[in-house]
Amino acid sequence: MKFLSHRISWIEPSPLAKVLGRISELSKAGFKVISLAAGDPDPDVVPRKILAEISSYVIENIPGSVLYTPTTGVEDLRIELSKFIKEYDGYEAYPENIIITSGSTAALDLLIRILIDPGDIVVVENPSYVVSLYAFKQLGANLVGVDVYSDGIDTYTLEDKIRRLKNEGKKIKLIYTIPTGQNPSGATMSIDKRRHLLEIASKYDLLIIEDMAYNYVVLEGSSPPTIKSFDREDRVIPIGTLSKIMGTGFRVGWVVATDLIKKYVVSEKQPIDYCAPAISQYIAIEFLRRDVHKISIERSREVYRVKRDVMIRSIEEKIREAEFSKPVAGMFLMLRLPNVDETLFAENLMEKYKVAVLPGKPFYTDDKGRDMIRLNFSRPSIDDIKEAVDKIGVLYRELKS
Ligand SMILES: *Cc1c(COP(=O)(O)O)cnc(C)c1O
């Protein structure tokens, strides 16, 4: 169509949007769909009663809660987040260096806009979060993937690839990583790899965007130190979010930036959405001040650990051939179903058994997702997890026979 820009040729339909669309069509048609597709928290784990009290308190008593906020976000929230970040992410973020965004999805988009020229190379984990991969691609980045194992990205392969690309004269700007509870693989990067990754970034003069979405959803053991906590060169740009503990619907995320990057992020952000939702920001202040986050983090850990274990036990009982590694953080498990076409499998599973999952392929920069599907275990109920895995097993045997 003649009115569209040239850039739209880089825009691909999102696989997640497609699945969510189909879920809503089927639900409207009266079907019960079990969704393991999205990455939401369990709405019954989110402390909704307390949030309801806070919401009405905020709207009644804080006039600013229904108005625009500064583009950088409400100062009190930046102060509360500064304390929260110090406690949970182990690094110093001064309130004036925090920019509140509409979820960390927007933070990443803003960073890409100010850092990436079309054709620049971005190194990503393979697999990585499909929404982030699309954000990079839609703004013209060329992605280079490095395989992820259960203890994180293979840093030696990473260095080889970077060295080779540099020798070829290619322009590499940054590495995007989700070190804890990686989406979709469920991997958590070891401390040695975190240090090594930072050394490599320093050696080849690259930035790291550290996506901390699952830092507060650690199911076992303690949270490993963030890459940012080792950073002495302002090389790591952290993005974070309250989505997984306060609720994805509030849209409260952030980026911690140096003065220079902050200046451009703010200029870029203002014409896009002016500010993150004021009501959500004021609710987030109370969420943190009243220590509601502590309740939510503790409950998430307990409930999601149980759900993860139910999912794993069901898979082991029902689908012997399936392969996966056990996540110690996050909300996902990547399941390999040997010799299936994942896209066809996901479609059949939805149409025939009304179970929604995401096919693996869009999460990968190469063909490795061919027989993988991503399963979320935080949102569905325990019974739904059992039923969904059962149906995955049934369909797998049907397709194999
Ligand atoms: C859920 C998630 C986010 C957070 O998105 P919001 O926009 O803050 O809701 C960011 N990165 C990853 C990898 C995620 O899975």
Image (spheres, rainbow, N blue to C red):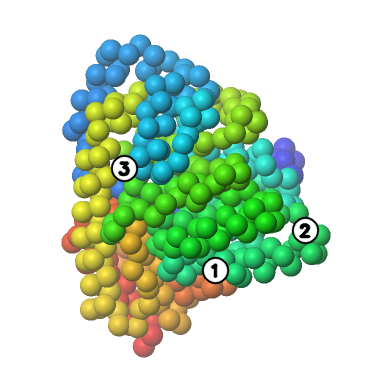
In this picture, residue 202 sits left or right of residue 165: left
Residue tagged by mark 3?
245
Residue 205 in percent (x, y) is at 69, 51
Q: Are marks 1 and 2 in contact (CB under 8 Å)?
A: no
For the question of whether residue 145 can be seen, the reply is yes
Quarter of the image containing the N terminus? top right
SS state under label 2: loop
- What type is the residue that disc 2 sits on? Lys
- What type is the residue that disc 3 sits on? Ile
Q: Which numbered tag is attached to residue 259?
A: none
Say which of 399 and 320 sits in front: 320
SS state under label 3: helix
- Label 3: few (<14), some (14–19) or many (≥20) C-alpha neighbours in 10 Å: many
Q: Residue at image x 38%, y 49%?
A: 215
The quadrant in which residue 283 appears is top left
Q: Residue at image x 26%, y 77%?
A: 316
Q: CA distance from mark 3 to mark 1?
A: 29 Å
Q: Earlier in the sequence, mark 1 or mark 2?
A: 1
Residue tagged by mark 2?
170
Q: Which numbered tag is attached to residue 154?
A: 1
Q: Nearer the viewer, mark 1 or mark 2?
A: 1
- Label 2: few (<14), some (14–19) or many (≥20) C-alpha neighbours in 10 Å: some
Residue 32 in percent (x, y) is at 25, 56
In this picture, residue 214 sits left or right of residue 158: left
Residue 277 in percent (x, y) is at 43, 26
Quarter of the image containing the C terminus? bottom left
In this picture, residue 164 sits left or right of residue 239: right
Residue 309 in percent (x, y) is at 23, 66
Say which of 243 and 172 sits in front: 172
| The residue positioned farthest toward the right in the image shown | 169
